[in-house]
């Protein structure tokens, strides 16, 4: 059986990303080891510390910048995180200074919001009804 163990989001600064993803979003650092000129730096949900890891991957490859800019320019999130209550999470995160490009929006079977991760990505939060 195949399962997802690590997924990634490209970030422009690993230290800044770690601070945002832990201090603002509430993830916990799981792995932090040197990897060439960067780090293998992952975070996990405190609700599932042995679950899927999110790799905060450096965006140094020449193709990544245009890719990220195109996604942000079109308002497309790089990834999506599930939350119990999008409305409550948006309020909590706004209280921490997180900026949203889309406030909590009811789309029928799902409520979504989109935030700026300060590292060059839009991230969607979603609650299935």
Image: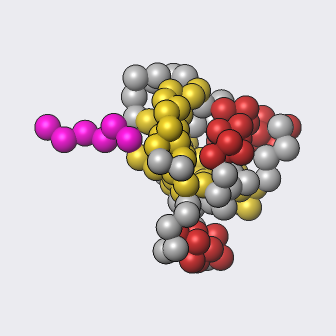
The residue segment tinted magenta is 1-6
Q: Residue at x 46, y 23 (%)?
A: 48
For the residue pair 105 and 96, the one nearer the viewer reads as 96
- 8 or 72, which is in the foreground? 8
Which residue extends farthest left? 1
**Which residue sits at x=64%, y=70%?**
72
Q: Position of residue 119 (x, y in %)?
A: 68, 55
Residue 94: in sight, yes or no? Answer: yes
What coloring was used for the rendering? secondary structure
Q: Position of residue 8 (x, y in %)?
A: 46, 49
Q: Position of residue 59 (x, y in %)?
A: 55, 61
- On the image, the x and y values in percent for residue 18 come to 65, 39
Q: How many numbered circles are shown?
A: 0
Whether the magenta-drawn stretch holds residue 2 is answered as yes
Q: Image height check: is 11 above or below 94?
A: below
Against 100, residue 16 (above or below) is above
């Amino acid at each position: 059986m195949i399962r997802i163990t690590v997924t990634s989001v490209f970030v422009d600064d690993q230290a800044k990303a770690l601070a945002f993803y832990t201090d603002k979003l509430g993830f916990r650092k799981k792995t932090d080891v040197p990897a060439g000129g960067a780090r293998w730096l992952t975070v996990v949900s405190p609700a599932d510390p042995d679950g899927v890891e999110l790799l905060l991957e450096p965006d140094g490859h020449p193709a990544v910048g245009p890719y990220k800019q195109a996604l942000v320019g079109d308002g497309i999130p790089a990834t999506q995180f599930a939350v119990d209550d999008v409305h409550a999470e948006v309020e909590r995160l706004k209280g921490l200074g997180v900026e949203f490009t889309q406030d909590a929006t009811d789309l029928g079977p799902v409520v979504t919001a989109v935030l700026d991760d300060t590292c060059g990505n839009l991230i969607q939060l979603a609650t299935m009804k």
